[in-house]
Amino acid sequence: MKTQAVVAISPRSTPQVREVDIDEPGSGELMVEVCACGVGPADRLTLSGRDPDALFPFVPGHEAVGRVVAIGAGVESVTRGDIVIPLVVPECGRCEYCQSRRSNLCQALRATQGRGVMPGGRTRLGLEGQPLFHYMGVSGLARHLVIPEVAAARVACDAPFPELAVLCGPVVTGMGAVFNVARVEPGESVVVFGLGPIGLGVVRASLLAGAGRIIAVEPSAVKRDLGRRFGATELKSPSELGSSPAAALIELTGGGVDVAFECVGDPTVMRSAVECTRKGWGRTVILGVVGVAETLEIHPAHFVLGRRVTGCAYGGVRGRSELPRYLELYRKGMIPIAPMITSCASLAEAGAILAREDEADVIRNVVTI
């Protein structure tokens, strides 16, 4: 069948809305009519050409929510009409990682997702007879998408679609990093670098976890104000911390923070995040995305002194089984999403939205479809 989608032909080209071909779902797959999709830094990074592993041409977008309109043979966990979140990190429940309960990095789609194709080895998208690659297993900037059942999280919530897209994508990533990865304890001190929706999710989850001190570092005054509303106890612009942010934070906290979260995607900031943590037990969680060629340089002495550094995908959250926890917090009014949405635009305006994402005060733009 035909549908409309944003298509990126080559690095640094302007994505355009095109009529594309999309196959009906095969066995174990479903088709989703997209209702909303957030536009974030990962999309921008891939479009910029900084990621040498990026596959072109492709349909961008990975923070989507939509309604199931068709199901393939063998699909049992969802049915037509269900609202679902297409997951970048699937959850099959059967692989070694799912069974271990030690990681959310399900391996069911690992062999094909990174190649931009479906489990059968080919794409479900095409343009003028040529294949289009799937992006992060989702390709959400389109009127329709096809995903495997193991990458569909059913959502029993009547929230506005733009809010669901932001909540179940970047916000859950940040919150999961607090609850599942860092496991922030009551009374601990936290610093958050960057107050996009991931960073704001970190701030809110740290508040819910009982952190005693939540320091947010963010150049945008608009975002700092929102960080305070979300629970940050102290707001700093990078300029206030001077040429050595780590030293300034160590002095401010009398020895360093217990936990640091990097939500910017800048190796220099990542280094500051590691260096500002307290020796003995300080831990850093890296959430920002960078190009494949970019590296983090850090002296081994920081680790000899007991500091730990880790990263995570989707906040360590198992999307199909754990999203209900976050939806319940949202329903209780404990995760305010609306203030994070800078603007909503139509699919026809998606190219402009992708370009505007560099604006300093943008938290999250959402395309409604």
Image (spheres, rainbow, N blue to C red):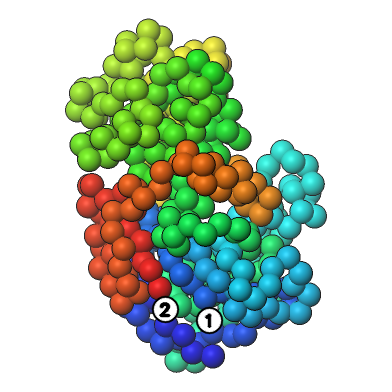
Within 10 Å of disc 2 (Cα), the crowding (few <14, some 14-19, many 20+) is many
| Residue drawn at 50 percent across, 45 percent down | 330
* Residue 125: mark: 1
The foreground one among 28 and 96 is 28
Nearer to the camera, 299 or 29: 29
Q: Which residue is drawn at 44% across and 75% down?
A: 142
Q: Which residue is drawn at 57% across and 33% down?
A: 179
Residue type at numbered disc 1 = Leu
Secondary-structure class at tag 1: strand
Determine the CA span between mark 2 and mark 1.
10 Å
- Observer-nearest of 262 and 201: 201
- Label 2 SS: strand
Name the N-terminal-most of marks 2 and 1. 2
Residue at point 39% right, 23% down?
214
Marks 2/1 in contact by CB < 8 Å: the verdict is: yes
Q: Can residue 83 be seen in this view?
A: yes
Quarter of the image for residue 312 reads top right
Q: Mark 2 points at which residue?
A: 5
Q: Quadrant of residue 5?
A: bottom left
Give the x, y percent position of residue 170: 46, 49
The x, y position of residue 345, in whole percent, is 30, 68
Amino acid under disc 2: Ala
